[in-house]
Amino acid sequence: MPSTAHPGSSRPETEDDPRPQLRPAAALVLVLEALMIAAAATASFWLSRTAGESAGLMMALGVFLLVFALGAAVAARSLLQRGRFGLGYGITWQLFQALVGASLLRGALYWQGALALVLAVVAFVLLLQLVRSTPLPEQH
């Protein structure tokens, strides 16, 4: 893979990125999470049709989930562009996702909770490995 310069930078893209395959892998996990969150939002909107008195709550939950799905998608794009937003948002999101996964397990939603926890751990490990390889703002 040729070493190309990052836009706005004089150094090669792979100079500080000893394992460049981690960046697309971490972005892929974030995109997968964004799709799953968007699916949960869609289910919330769908269920609001038959929710009766709590229809407004279900709609609000759907909007709330869509905001986080958008955040995860933007974080994935940021990772691919070697931006710092994707790391900060992604790592923080994994902590919240682990809490949600644990809550799902406590609520007897075993495969959903296990899936959330596995994705959170995988993404967290990948993102932490990328922290050192992402340039600081003054290095651009």
Image: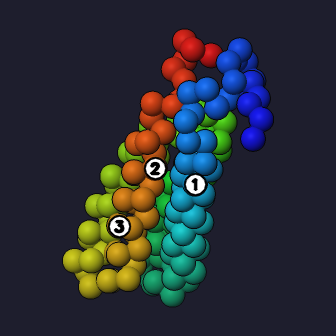
Label 3 secondary element: helix
In the displayed structure image, the side of residue 75 where residue 114 appears, left or right:
left
Residue 126, numbered label: 2
* Other residues around mark 2 within 10 Å, as few (<14) / some (14–19) / many (≥20): many
Identify the secondary structure beneath mark 1: helix
Q: Residue at x 48, y 58 (%)?
A: 64
Question: How far apart are the alpha carbons under marks 2 and 1?
Answer: 8 Å
Q: Residue at x 30, y 75 (%)?
A: 104
Asked if the residue at tag 1 contacts the one at tag 2, i.e. Cβ–Cβ closer than 8 Å, the answer is: yes
Q: Quadrant of the N terminus?
A: top right
- Please state which of residues 125 and 59 is positioned toward the viewer in this rendering: 125
Instruction: Looking at this view, name the residue that lies furthest to the left.
Output: 106
Please identify the quarter of the rendering in which residue 77 is found.
Answer: top right
- In the rendered view, tell whether residue 53 sits above or below residue 118: below
Q: Earlier in the sequence, mark 1 or mark 3?
A: 1
Residue 15, compared with residue 78, is above or below; it is above
Residue located at (41% from left, 74% from top): 115
Name of the residue lying farthest toward the front:
1
Residue 14 position within the rendered picture, expressed as x and y whole percent measured from the top left = 64, 31
| Residue at image point 46% right, 72% down | 58
Question: Nearer the viewer's eye, disc 3 or disc 2?
Answer: 2
Give the label on residue 25, or none: 1
The amino acid pointed to by label 1 is: Ala
The residue carrying mark 3 is 117
Query: Which color scheme did the rendering employ for the protein?
Result: rainbow
* First in residue order: circle 3 vs circle 2: 3
